[in-house]
Image (cartoon, rainbow, N blue to C red):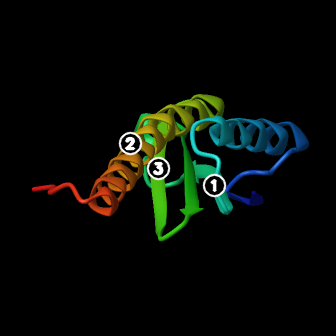
Amino acid sequence: MKINIQGTGIELTEAIKRYAIEKTKSLEKYFDNIQQADIDVGMNTQRHNKGKIYYAEINLSVPGKVLRVVKESEDLYKSIDKVRDHFKVELEKLKGKMREIDRKDLRNQKGYQVE
């Protein structure tokens, strides 16, 4: 998996890079054919009344699709964790759908009717 990372409105330290890349790489155990991950972490400047709001956005390229998740939190690391947790569910759903399609194809090859 190829990983691109950028920071918006914050200084992108090695610790932040390492944490975001580690969490993104851990998604490979849920879906093994992730081709590319684009990570954007930063701070929203529009909500000064609520204090500092950090966000994490990850775009994953899988065969035939691009999956995108954005999460916000008062802590940058929490935002990254929230994105990872959301992607875990999304990738498991996608994997289930792909398996169902494969099963239907196998049934059709054997001569069974699928409705």
In this rendering, the label closer to the viewer, 3 or 1: 1
- Image quadrant containing the N terminus: bottom right
Q: In x, y percent, where is residue 64?
A: 48, 71
Q: In the rendered structure, are the residues bearing label 1 and label 2 in contact, judged by CB atoms less than 8 Å apart? A: no
Q: In x, y percent, where is residue 9?
A: 67, 57
Tell me the distance, in whole angstroms, between the alpha carbons under discs 1 and 2.
14 Å
Q: Amino acid at mark 2?
A: Gly
The numbered mark at residue 33 is 1
Q: Amino acid at mark 1?
A: Asn
Q: In x, y percent, where is residue 104?
A: 29, 54
**Dot placed on the residue nearer the N-terminal end, 2 or 3:** 3
Q: Residues within 10 Å of mark 1 (few under 14, many from 20)?
A: few
In this rendering, the label closer to the viewer, 2 or 3: 2
Q: Does 56 sit left or right of 25 as displayed?
A: left
- In the picture as drawn, the residue positioned furthest to the right comes out as 14
Q: Residues within 10 Å of mark 3 (few under 14, many from 20)?
A: some
Mark 1: secondary structure: loop
Residue under numbered circle 3: 70
**Dot placed on the residue nearer the N-terminal end, 3 or 1:** 1
- In the picture as drawn, the residue positioned furthest to the bottom comes out as 64
Residue under numbered circle 2: 96
Please determine whether, in this image, residue 4 is positioned above or below residue 87.
below
Residue located at (24% from left, 60% from top): 111
Q: Nearer the viewer, residue 29 or 75?
A: 29
Please determine whether, in this image, residue 112 is positioned above or below residue 51.
below
Q: Residues within 10 Å of mark 2 (few under 14, many from 20)?
A: few
- Image quadrant containing the C terminus: bottom left
Mark 2: secondary structure: helix
Residue located at (47% from left, 44% from top): 91
